[in-house]
Amino acid sequence: MQTTAVSGKQEESETTEATDMHAKHLKQLEDEHRHMLERYAESQKILDKYSVMPGKSSDYMSLLHRITSENASDTSRAKQPLVLKKISDSFTETYLPFKDNLALREEYINYYGDIRLGKVLEDLDRLAGAVAYKHASDAEGNLAPIIFVTAAVDRIDLKSRLSPDCNYRLAGTVTYVGFSSMEIYIKIQAVPVSGEASEQEPNLVARFTMVGRDKYTGKSSQVNPLLLEDESQRRLVKISEQIKEHKKKIADTNLYKRPPSAEERLVIHQLWLGTKDYQSNTYGSHTSLPKDMVWLDKTAMESVTICFPSERNVHNKIFGGHLMRLAHELSFANGSVFTKSRPSYVSLDDFSFKKPVNIGSILRLTSQVVYSEPENGTFQVAVSADVIDNLTNTVERTNTFYFNFSSPSGTVSRVIPRS
């Protein structure tokens, strides 16, 4: 009896310690996340004054045509000399006039009368590419012999609903340049109508990382450096460097690179303690799962599609924006089943395109609700993209997307791992 009592006290002490460590770990993550969002907000304020510039959507379409035609041709291999470019030099904009163009509205509208965000994600990726090519051009606007690919999406936040009864302006510019990479900031805002303020609050903000490769060798190719004109622009670059360092720190803690820390192991143990009563024991008995809890593996959904040439980019690979659209639509379907309602998209966390997807590939998307916060009705859906080789039956992971949603009811079930 004494041994049992001591054992019980020891287990209680370990549980308390795990709970404290879990709370400390969550607090640390929340603080880091808050600081990162503050940096994003600060950089957005700085950028606002550089994105009120003249521009025409026809210029954007002309630029896209030039990118497509010149990448398809075998022009001179001579490298262009690097030139200093200002932030404003790469500014590119286009429009989505849903209010004025009924045919366009019909193409973008979903079954419940809102805008299909997956289609908008395609537009964002396309615009990011145009901005990259514009920054890499020479002083006369000639395109460099460089191909640009979307290396990563740092974050996409939907700040307010996109309405089919409004016209929208998409504007993007380079905010940071490395050796062969560049960070591109894009925002979507409503075109003001008569009587409204000339500059509307952004409905959506996004950050892309584009990487340049030599058109003929495929090796990293240096891009034009950025000319910083004042202190606010230097601050902008510093913020981008801080965000880059934060991403590197997160990447270094990936489970594929190192095992869980002592704190993380305690968190895992606490999660297991919280679910063991609902697991079948040696005799097959267990407590029924409460109605407000769902096994994580029970939330899984999957789709398989063939990648057709119509979805290719200028490099004859599957367009990254197309992959984002497919992943978003599956995550929304998953969230709808999970909440038994129509969830609202909140944001897309950072991810990298690890490998290109070839035309003709069999693409498998697997989604799962991986985290939920019942107290505020938010949850996250992870969507993994895999390419299946039909000849060898091997599977290769290309990337994983993390979509954040909120439930209209203000509450969601708690997802718990089975093992």
Image (cartoon, rainbow, N blue to C red):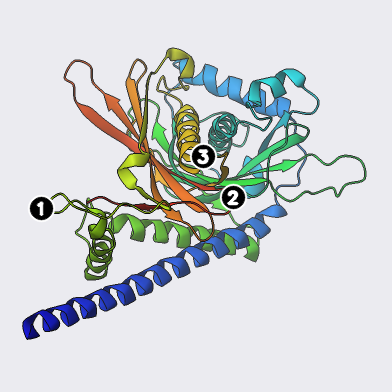
Crowdedness of circle 3 by 10 Å Cα count: few (<14), some, many (20+)? few
- What residue would you read off at disc 3? 340
Residue 44 appears left or right of 136: right
Dot 3: element = loop
The answer to which of marks 1 and 2 sits earlier in the sequence is 1
Side of 61 relative to 329 (left or right): right
**Relative to the observer, which residue lies in front, 339 or 358?**
339
Q: Residue furthest bottom?
A: 2
Which residue type does callout 3 highlight? Lys
The N terminus lies in quadrant: bottom left
Residue 75 can be seen, yes or no: no
**Do we see residue 316 in this rendering?**
yes
Does 117 sit above or below residue 64? below
How far separated are the C-alphas under marks 2 and 3?
A: 10 Å
What numbered label is drawn on residue 409?
2
Q: CA distance from mark 1 to mark 3?
A: 34 Å
Mark positioned earlier in the residue sequence (1 or 3): 1
Number of the front mark, 1 or 3: 1
Labels 1 & 2 near each other (Cβ < 8 A): no
Front tag of 1 and 2: 1
* Residue at the image point whose x is 34% and y is 61% from the top: 249
Q: Residue at x 21, y 70 (%)?
A: 262
Residue occupied by mark 1: 282
Say if mark 2 contacts mark 3, CB within 8 Å. no
Amino acid under label 2?
Ser
Left or right of 277 on screen, residue 120? right
Q: x, y percentage for residue 371? A: 40, 52
Q: Which mark is residue 352?
A: none
